Structures are given as C-alpha cells and as structure tokens.
Amino acid sequence: MTASSASSASPASPTSSGPTVSVALFTSDLRLRDNPVLRAALAAAEGVVPLFVLDRAVEEAGFAVPNRRAFLADCLAALDEGLRERGGRLVVRSGDPAEETTRLVHECGAHEVHIAGGVSGYAQQRETRLRMALEEAGCALRVHDAVITAVAPGALTPSGGRDHFAVFTPYFRRWSQAGRRTPLAAPRAVPVPEAPGSLRLPRREGARGAAPGLARGGERAGRERWASWRRKGGLQRYGQREGGQNDLGADATSRLSPHLHFGSLSPVELAHEAAAKGGAGAEAFVRQLAWRDFHHQVLAARPAASYTDYRPHGDRWRGTEGDAEREIAAWREGRTGYPLVDAGMRQLLHEGWMHNRARLLAASFLTKTLYVDWRIGAAHFLAHLVDGDIANNQLNWQWAAGTGTDTRPNRVLNPLTQARSYDPQGTYVRRWVPELAAVEGAAVHRPWRLPAAERARLDYPEPVVDLGEGQARFRAARQRDRG
Ligand SMILES: Cc1cc2nc3c(=O)[nH]c(=O)nc-3n(C[C@H](O)[C@H](O)[C@H](O)COP(=O)(O)OP(=O)(O)OC[C@H]3O[C@@H](n4cnc5c(N)ncnc54)[C@H](O)[C@@H]3O)c2cc1C
C-alpha cells in the first residue's frame, strides 16, 4: 500500500465472534492486478466483501450513458469472474454508495472499508459522506492513493505554495522524478463471507443504444489489448511521425483509455512496464500517462474546472441560438463539410471513441472556428465517449478552447493543415466518411475543389463556414471579449 489515510473512529469489533471482515469498495479500479484497495482489504481481515454500488446519482445526472454502461457491465462481469476463480464473488448493490456501503457494513459486521481516493468534486463529496456514515457505524474508512492515477493528485506541488501545477512541462519534470510504487500481483484467494446478498450483475446487452463498434471491457480484454499492441510494435512506433501516435490513418495508439477510465488496467503498472521497456516510443507513451495525471491533479485542486473556465478571460461564446444551432448540429453529426473534422465526429458515433488528434481538431473547430461554448462540445463528447472522464474531457476541452492550461490559448488548428500533417493520404477520412470513400489521395480533404459533376454525385455537404471567415470571427470575438 502506498500513501493511504485512515479516518474515523477506532475500528469497531465485529458484531459476531466470527471471522473479521473488511469491505473493498470498488469505484474506478475494476481490476484484481495491482489493486492496493483489494490487497489492503484482504490484509486487514479474514474475510473481504468486494462491493460495487451502481450509483443512483450518477444515473440521475445522466452520466451513465449507454457506451459507458456497456463497458462497465463487461468490467463487472470480468471482476466477478476473477473473484470466483479465487473463491470469492462480487457483491453488487444499487443506490447511494454511502448508504449502501454502511448497510453492508452492518450486515456483515465489517470493521474497515477500503476505497481508492477519488478526484472529481463528486468523488470527493462521496468520500466525505461515506466517512461520516461509517463513523456513525464505528467503522474505519481507509483511502488509498495512486490507484486511479500513477502519481496521487496533490503528491506533487510547485514551489511557491501553490496547491497544484497549472502547466504541464514543470509537472512532467517532477512527475518523472517521483518514485512510483511497485505494481502488486493479483491475490491468490479472496475469501468472501456467505451472508451478503447481491443484485444480478448488469449485462452489456442491457445498455441499449451503445455504439456498434464499441470495444470490449474488462481486465482480461484490457490486458490482451496491452499485450497485443506491444507485440505488434505499438510502443516502439508510438513517438514516430509515421505509424505513431499522431498518424490518424495508422490508428496506432494503444486504445487503452477506457480501461484506464474504469480501472480495468492500472496506470502504475502501465507506466512501470513501459518504462522497463525503454526507448523513445515508451518515453512518449509514459508522457501521455503523465498528461492524464496532470489533468487529474488540476481537477482535484479545482473541482469547479469541470464546468467553469479554469482561466477566465471573459469569452462570450455562442450558445445554441440562431445560426449556431445549425452549425452545432452539423458538428455533432459529422457534416461540417470539413472531412477531417467529420471523420472524427463519425468515429465517435460509431465507436464511442475518437483518436486524440481528431479530438483536438474537433474541439478546436467548435470553439475557435465556430466560437461555440466549449461546454456544449464537452457535453456531446461525454454523451458518447466510452472513456468519458470529467478530468480528461473537461480539461482537454478547456485546453483546446484556450480557457485551460494551454500556454498558447489563441492557437487555432486548421483542418487542412492538420490533414496535411496527420492524414496526408486521406486514409482516416475515407475510413469514416463513406460518401468520400471513392475520392483518391489528398483531394479527399478538399471536396469543394472536385469537378462539379463529381461533387454533385456525393451526398456530402458544403463547408458550414468559410475557414478564413470563421477564424477571423474568432479573433475578433477574442479581442472584443478579452480586450
Ligand atoms: C477534447 C478532448 C477530449 C478528451 N476527452 C477524454 C476523455 O474523456 N477521457 C480520456 O481518457 N481522454 C480524453 N482525452 C485525451 C485523449 O484524447 C485520450 O486519452 C486518447 O485519445 C485515448 O486514446 P489511447 O488510449 O489510444 O491513447 P494513447 O495515445 O495510447 O495514450 C495512452 C494513455 O495516455 C492517456 N492520454 C493520452 N493523451 C492524453 C491527453 N491529452 N490527456 C489526458 N490523458 C491522455 C490516456 O489515458 C491514454 O489511454 C481528450 C482529449 C481531447 C483533445
């Protein structure tokens, strides 16, 4: 166990004279390998109840969208299977996590509850409520850090008294030097007491409306993906221009983000294994894991950054009224008339996932070419992304909008320049925009230049806005709003 904090009253004795019991409350750490929460719960008692609570508040907030529900169902099924192989099982409840956990503590006479330290404002409140409820029950809450992230938020702070890093480069320097705990093996046995009842596990098929190309979830699927990606040279190629992380057509990134979001893979273990492999590709990959931690430490220190500008400059963004409504609808559907933007937006709808380079461009296009409020885009992403994450989504959106941690907040990504650099032959566009599949080479990025007869045969829209005009509008608005 790394840094962990205990709270509350001294642990109550078990209610019966039977074996001592602890609870491992799973949240965003749905794995058996390298799980400090489970290992500590096992070390603390003779029996452990592995618990997952389907959180009613998350449902009511609309956060439990079909893609993430489906992936979660896979993760819970895999977790239950792994526990059963070790003599245990997963207990699933539904409702308020604080109430349900406390109810279970009473049912099984547990004296300790173990949980991973959360990051978002909601996770922090949940922890506070849980701590208070358990205190009344005379049960200890033990919170484990560096479970959801490789380095705990708050573990690194800049000199000068600030509570978090606001710029990535100095954060990364410190992050790279910080010691990381050694990954833990999966436990051999998980003895679970008979008594506590469980709801049936949710099923992937129950998540109606999930994207047709949605990836499989669960620890085994995650480990297989990690192994096969490395076997095919993904890690070596990662930092290269061709076939690397920014090559849209090559589709060469790890695609591990949903596993990191649900914790079916451990960031500590990935960082450890990649660093052990060494080389420029591995270093570039580890750097991306640090970006993930960076956003988590910003959100942990500034939970309101999930909705309010991290660096407010007085932008008066366009909302959903008037002309903007038509432009936003075109953006959401992947019909802006800019093939690279549209390819990304179609990938999102088809897979519930989008390549990072396409996410950057889609976000820049919405905020800086259409000058639409970043929150509208972030909400659309959260409605579809299987890895949809408050820390990474909201703070990457703010980065793209120039309200976040980007040190060059006025940078604008031009779809045509991006196409030249990251999809020079148009492979990515032809894959995701079937109307343009027959257009060869780089011409696919400028369908408006095709001969009129050919254009007339394509069911593909004219550009929703002239790029030059859109970008001039952005600059004028920024000048007006920021003075
Ligand atoms: C507008 C926008 C919204 C985004 N929303 C999310 C989100 O909701 N959830 C999410 O996990 N990522 C988000 N990202 C970050 C990034 O796009 C994804 O993590 C990445 O595309 C996932 O693909 P991968 O697993 O193949 O990444 P790889 O390139 O293989 O990288 C490995 C891991 O590093 C982390 N990572 C990579 N890039 C970033 C980054 N820019 N910021 C933070 N972590 C990163 C991810 O956990 C990723 O799985 C967003 C980026 C943008 C620009």
Image (cartoon, rainbow, N blue to C red):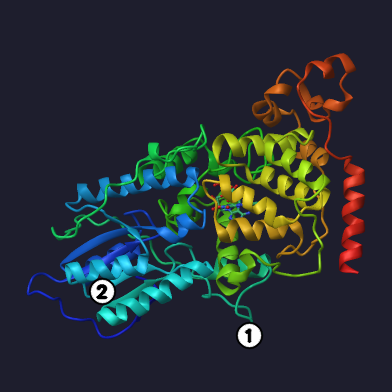
Which amino acid, by three-letter code, is at mark 2? Glu
- Within-10-Å neighbours for mark 1: few <14, some 14–19, many 20+: few
Name which quarter of the figure residue 188 lies in: bottom left
Asked if 287 appears above or below 434 in the picture, the reply is: below
100 left or right of 118 in image: left
- Within-10-Å neighbours for mark 2: few <14, some 14–19, many 20+: many
Between 312 and 329, which is closer to the camera in this rendering? Answer: 329
* Image quadrant where one finds the N terminus: bottom left
- List the residue tagged with mark 2: 112
Give the CA separation, mark 2 to mark 1. Answer: 34 Å
* Image quadrant where one finds the C terminus: bottom right
458 left or right of 146 in image: right
- List the residue tagged with mark 1: 161
The residue at 17%/67% (across/down) is 108
| Residue 322 place in picture, x, y as percent | 82, 47
> In this view of the protein, can residue 422 be seen by the observer?
no
Asked if 422 appears above or below 197 in the picture, the reply is: above
Callout 2 touching callout 1 (CB < 8 Å):
no
